Image (cartoon, rainbow, N blue to C red):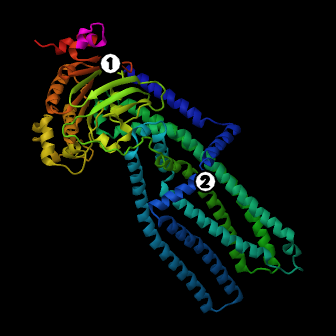
Amino acid sequence: MSKNKNLEKNIENSLKESSDKVFNEKSKSTYKKRIKKASDKTSNNKIGLIRLICYLQKLEPAFFPLVIIENIFASTIPFINIYLSARIIDGITIGETREELISRALLMILLNMFIALIRWAIDKIIIVLRVNIYNKNDLEVIKKALYMDYQVMEKEGTLDYIQMAADGSNYMGGISSLAQNLGESIQHIVMIIYSAVALINFLLIKSDVSKNAFVNSGLYIIILIAAMIFTAFITIHNIMENSMFRSSVFQDSVSSNRKFGWFFSLINNYKYGQQTRIYDMYDFLDNFSEEFKKETGNHWRRIFKSQLKTNNHLRVVTTLMMCLLYIFIGMKVYSGAVTIGSLTFYTGMFTSFMGAVSGIGFMLGSVKQQTFYLGNYIKFLELKNEKYDGTIPVEKRLDNEYELEFRNVSFHYPNSDKPVLKNISTKIKVGGKMAIVGRNGSGKSTFIKLLCRLYDPTEGEILLNGIDIKKYDYDEYRDLFGVVFQDFNLFSFSIAQNVAAGVNYNKEKVMKCLEQAGMSERISEFKHGIEEEIYKINGDGVEISGGEAQKIAIARALYKDAPVVILDEPTAALDPVSELEIYEKFDKMVDEKTAIYISHRMSSCRFCENILVFNDGKIEQMGSHEELYDAKEGIYHEMWDAQAQYYNEG
């Protein structure tokens, strides 16, 4: 329990540091710096909006145009209602007939119904297209991830693009939400145009000079236009500033949100239910939940406080402007320039103008933030593969006579300059049995990753039959290998699909491989046989043990029927005796193929003609068991004697 207490304490300290960093900023200068930081980051993505719109058009060409059309209709309805309402009021004032008044009211109703019907039809289409966009976007990301070079996928920042885009989508909506916000911005722009034309017309109306000469003067026009521009500027500035602050807080919270998101996903995973109950982790999990509530509470309090400050500023500015406008319109009415109905029309148009200005401020702030976050999708999708894909076909040999050679190969992983392999040179004669042994971290698994071309060497070259493997067609070269990796994975599909690594499969071949792997007896116990789905992701799968999963992974390697079969320490968690039994069975399964066994233990060496001994990224020794064991000063002799109690016969 002390370990749990220490872990809880570390988490509390981490959360406190994060909270202090994000939320305890009281000085105005720090506030301004945060806004500038967010603004600078977002401004670096100016071209991102155009690229996102192009990407959206690629996903669903009709969506954005329909959103624009729908929002133009939406902006037209208020103008129609204000204009016709004003005409009805004027009609009542001047004593128009009932028929004339009713006709205007009916016209307003019919226009509203007609536009509402069009918007309803467009909205129905938009809803379907929005779902398509979500699905197509997810598919694009999945396809990109599947076909991306493994070494690119592992680079620092590659998956961060997707994580930030996903976090931004959860926070502000996805790519279709961006289009919706752009459409609403267009709606506000159209409304501003309607309002501006009406208000300019209002300014140009001449009145009776004898009653009020001021309303006809240029100063009157300048004051009102300046007030409107000032109001629009202050409104948009305050809204954008608040938007950038929200963005800044969110950016600093991405890491903690990801951490808590990961943590709470564990609670919903049935596989972890045993641990939480056996180790009585309820208080620990509850404490974690409380800390998260505190942190998110502070997060939203800061945002609401900023929003309240912005809203108060806008209320003051809008109220002052409305008072000024009523005074000026009242002067026009008093001078006889406009009617009572026009008073209603122009005040309504100014109210619409202010609403549109506020709306476009909010929309542009949202679009700016969404462009920053969703631009990471584009960055991810535009990542280039680094591997050179050759064109030379791999010779199909019935005798499987291939020779692989490492020639002065050195390698370090992406994001690290530390060498993992150092000047490796060796030949692998396809058709024999080879063991690769060494202590943990000596470079064994990395050697195999380079052999299978998951990575390319940092220095040197790897040859197949004397030709650099980069020059071969990548897919054909990859088909040479069937590998059971140390950290192999099975999927929540049927057993047959896991073995065949595909949707379609040969049932007889699947059963034969499972039988060779020692899994046939267990398969016979399943209700649906090889069609049985493993794991309870969908609620109706079966649970399998680690040893059974290992057998299915071996069957998958056998099903591929590749010339070279590699066993990369998948038995590391087993005891040496169990590991020896698996190697004995596996050796019989691949009797006619090349087999490469990788382990930090020595059980695999009994079946191999050639053994490579790795140490600190180098091949320390090479030879047969007898040759290496007789070299009593070497690592192999030392390791064998240390484990001899498990392997000596008799």
Instruction: Report the residue that reaches farthest toward the top.
Output: 633
Query: Which quadrant would the C terminus be assigned to in this image?
Result: top left
Q: Nearer the viewer, residue 313 or 637?
A: 637
Query: Tag 2: Cα neighbours inside 10 Å, few (<14), some, or many (≥20)?
Result: many
Q: Is residue 497 left or right of residue 220?
A: left
Query: Which quadrant would the N terminus be assigned to in this image?
Result: top left
- Mark 2 highlights which residue? 365
Which residue corresponds to the image point at 19% horizontal and 49% vertical from the top-left?
505
Considering only order in the chain, which callout, 1 or 2, is on the residue closer to the N terminus? 2
Res 410 → quadrant: top left
Residue 23 shows up from this direction = yes
* Alpha carbons under labels 2 and 1: distance apart: 56 Å
Which residue corresponds to the image point at 55% horizontal and 73% vertical from the top-left?
73
Say if the magenta span includes residue 447. no
Q: Which amino acid does label 2 sit on?
A: Gly
For label 2, the SS is helix
Magenta residues? 627-637
Residue 278 is situated, as x and y percent measured from the top left of the image, at 28, 28
Which residue corresponds to the image point at 52% horizontal and 60% vertical from the top-left?
179
Q: Which amino acid does label 1 sit on?
A: Arg
Instruction: Report the residue that reaches farthest toward the front.
Output: 466
- Mark 1 highlights which residue? 439
Say if the magenta span includes residue 631. yes
Res 263 → quadrant: top left
**Please, what is the dominant secondary structure of the magenta stretch?**
helix
Residue 66 is situated, as x and y percent measured from the top left of the image, at 50, 69
